[in-house]
């Protein structure tokens, strides 16, 4: 399972990279705004800064919602760095853009996916990644994880190569459940990765080992 971090915060990206388990970064317009990155040039520069920190894929989202606009923006984003993956929303023109980018060798991540049908369409259009937003489904009293299972089944039935990128991960148990269900990638906050290493018995055990060592030395 690949680990992506879902942030535009360079310090957090550096910290995750230093842990040695980071495979990529996802961003979106809300995450860029949260870091105060505004204006086209600053946003483009920020993507390059992120690419220079991580070794893996960096998703950069288009703002346009019409086909021509998405193609223009996506081509500009893809030109920035070979790690860039163009993030395209699951709308009618987005599906057309996914197919165009697939035919022209530009890698894509289809975002804002909330149903198995949308995921099927994204795979048919040649998306490299599909991003089901599991946390936002949980937020409205539905089951985000069952969407991951449904997409896994559909993709396996037809050997689609599109990678399932579980997004809107909110906590560590989301990561573990997505791993059990066979999601190819998860993207979440740094805290969702940090939670994986915590166990009180590890802390207690280490304390005892060190105390016993001290007794004999
Ligand atoms: O990757 C998608 C993600 O940024 C959405 O997360 O927490 O805003 O639902 P959230």
Image (cartoon, helix red, strand yellow):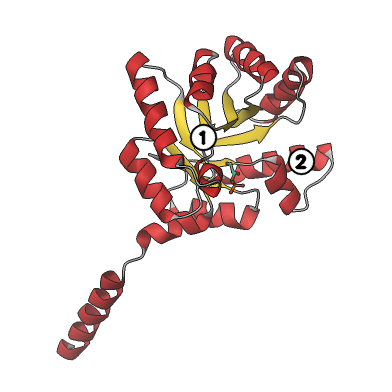
119 vs 188: above or below: above
Tell me what residue is drawn at x 50 percent, y 13 percent.
124
Q: Is mark 2 within 8 Å of ligand 1?
A: no
For the C terminus, the quadrant is bottom left
Identify the secondary structure beneath mark 2: helix
Residue at the extreme front of the image, as rendered: 141
Question: Looking at the image, which is closer to me, 109 or 145?
Answer: 145
Q: Position of residue 119 (x, y in %)?
A: 50, 24
Which image quadrant for residue 95?
A: top right
Q: Residues within 10 Å of mark 2 (few under 14, many from 20)?
A: some
Determine which of the numbered discs, if any, sits on residue 101 in the image.
Answer: none
For residue 132, the mark is: 1
Query: Residue at horizontal 66%, vertical 22%?
Result: 91
Q: Badge 1 local density, few (<14 within 10 Å), some, or many (20+)?
A: many
Name the residue tied to disc 2: 43
Q: Is residue 153 left or right of residue 29?
A: left
């Amino acid at each position: 399972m690949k680990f992506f971090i879902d942030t535009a915060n360079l310090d957090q990206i550096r910290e995750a990279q230093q842990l040695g388990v980071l495979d990529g970064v996802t961003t979106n317009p809300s995450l860029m705004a949260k870091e105060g990155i505004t204006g086209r040039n600053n946003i483009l520069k920020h993507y390059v800064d992120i690419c220079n920190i991580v070794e893996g894929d960096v998703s950069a989202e288009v703002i346009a919602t019409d086909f021509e606009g998405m193609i223009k923006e996506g081509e500009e984003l893809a030109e920035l760095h070979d790690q860039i993956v163009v993030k395209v929303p699951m709308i009618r023109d987005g599906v057309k853009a996914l197919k165009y980018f697939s035919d022209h060798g530009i890698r894509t991540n289809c975002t804002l996916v909330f149903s198995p049908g949308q995921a099927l369409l994204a795979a048919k259009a040649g998306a490299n990644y599909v991003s089901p937003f599991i946390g936002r489904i949980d937020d409205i009293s539905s089951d985000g994880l069952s969407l991951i299972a449904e997409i896994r089944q559909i993709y396996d039935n037809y050997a689609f190569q599109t990678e399932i990128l579980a997004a809107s991960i909110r906590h560590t148990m989301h990561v573990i459940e997505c791993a059990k269900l066979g999601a190819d990638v998860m993207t979440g906050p740094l805290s969702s990765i940090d939670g994986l290493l915590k166990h009180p018995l590890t802390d207690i055990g280490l304390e005892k080992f060190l105390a016993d060592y001290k007794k004999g030395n």
